[in-house]
Image: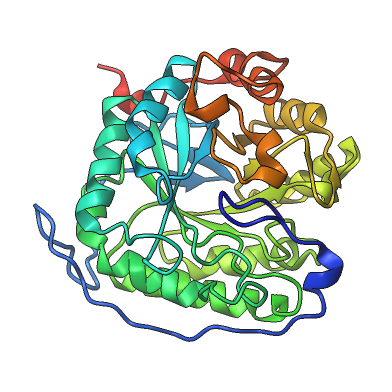
Amino acid sequence: MRKRTAVAGTSLAVVAALVLAGRLHHSHGEPVPGGSPRPGDTAVRPGFHVRDGRLYDANDHEFVMRGVGENHAVFPERTARAFSDVKALGANAVRVELSTGVVAKRNDAADVAHVIALCRRNRLICVLVVDDTTGWGYRPQAIAQARAVDYWISIRGALAGQERYAVLDVANEPYVLDNVRTWPGDTMDSIRRLRDAGIQQTLLVDAPDWGQDLSFTMRDHAAEVFAADPRRNTVFSIHVYGAFGRATNIRDYAGAYLKAKLPIAVTEFAYTHHDGDVDEDAVMAEAQAQGIGYLAWSWSGNSGDVSNLDMVHQFDAKAMTWWGRRVFDGPNGIRQTSREATVYTP
């Protein structure tokens, strides 16, 4: 459940009354320098990988994400400066929102290659995510997760050879409340399609229920979804908003994955949202104590009703908000806990 830079959050009670929507669309690959991997490509390229419920970089060092969200799809002109600024503040990763062309201008293969290059220039790990799926089944313009998979396949040439520097969050919040029953099967199918297309990046899959897994659908089906990945290289992505108002909520939820040796990351969280307050101190403390990655929402550019979640005013790193100071400089914050990926170490 969350913001959107151009779309306000919505109450779960309203969401529960709405119906499924979305159609499958197949798109064609886009050429980029270096060409695309062939479907069914099995030649392993060194990159991020999962072992015993933990994420490791290409040098086989454990990597714990510490970063923020950034909306490249809506504010592409701000991306280069944003990456430089968040790196200077200590981040080791950035979650970059992209569009298939439905909600914003399409980020084509050349643009995605440019985004990855900017991440590399700033020694950040790119967590690339399709934003157009947000609220599928509720937002009329949102697309199904399957169409996000089509998009990744169409730009796979930009991804090949970048497994050391970029991971894929397949689709942002693609399941709300009424369509959660299809999440396990649809997600397993998405993983198989991406692997069959030769995409080797570590994959992240967002929980249903606006990313918060209120129904525990992701938790209860995580083992079978993980097993569906022939590379066993999938991380489970949870968004922490009003459903996680107490410390025990995040501790117990994350603990279920850790006990099962299944990887989990908090890929969005804030200190409040439309659905209630969040115990951000507990989120960050538990993430540090349990070695879980977190990516806070968000750098800048949120719409007016959630503009309080901007970490800086008007993309200006010198005009940091209370939330920005908490994320970067507070206890268990990014400056204190972030460690750069060793792929950038000479």
Between 84 and 230, which is closer to the camera in this rendering? Answer: 84
Q: Determine if residue 220 is in view.
A: yes
User: Percent x, y for residue 331?
Assistant: 73, 15
User: Percent x, y for residue 193?
Assistant: 38, 75
Between 277 and 345, which is closer to the camera in this rendering? Answer: 277
Q: Based on the displayed image, in which of its 4 quarters is residue 337 positioned?
A: top right
Q: Residue furthest front?
A: 304
Q: Residue 153 vs residue 248: left or right?
A: left
Q: Residue 253 vs residue 268: left or right?
A: right
Quadrant for the N terminus, please: bottom right
Between 218 and 30, which is closer to the camera in this rendering? Answer: 30
User: Percent x, y for residue 154?
Assistant: 26, 69
Q: As displayed, is residue 149 above or below residue 51?
A: below
Residue visible at 43% across and 29% down in the picture:
61
Q: As displayed, is residue 179 above or below residue 11?
A: below
Residue visible at 57% across and 26% down in the picture:
313
User: Percent x, y for residue 120?
Assistant: 28, 31
Q: Residue 247 vs residue 309: left or right?
A: right
Quadrant for the C terminus, please: top left
Q: Residue 35 vs residue 208: left or right?
A: left
Between 6 and 130, which is closer to the camera in this rendering? Answer: 6
Q: Based on the displayed image, in which of its 4 quarters is residue 100 positioned?
A: bottom left
Q: As displayed, is residue 166 above or below residue 30?
A: above
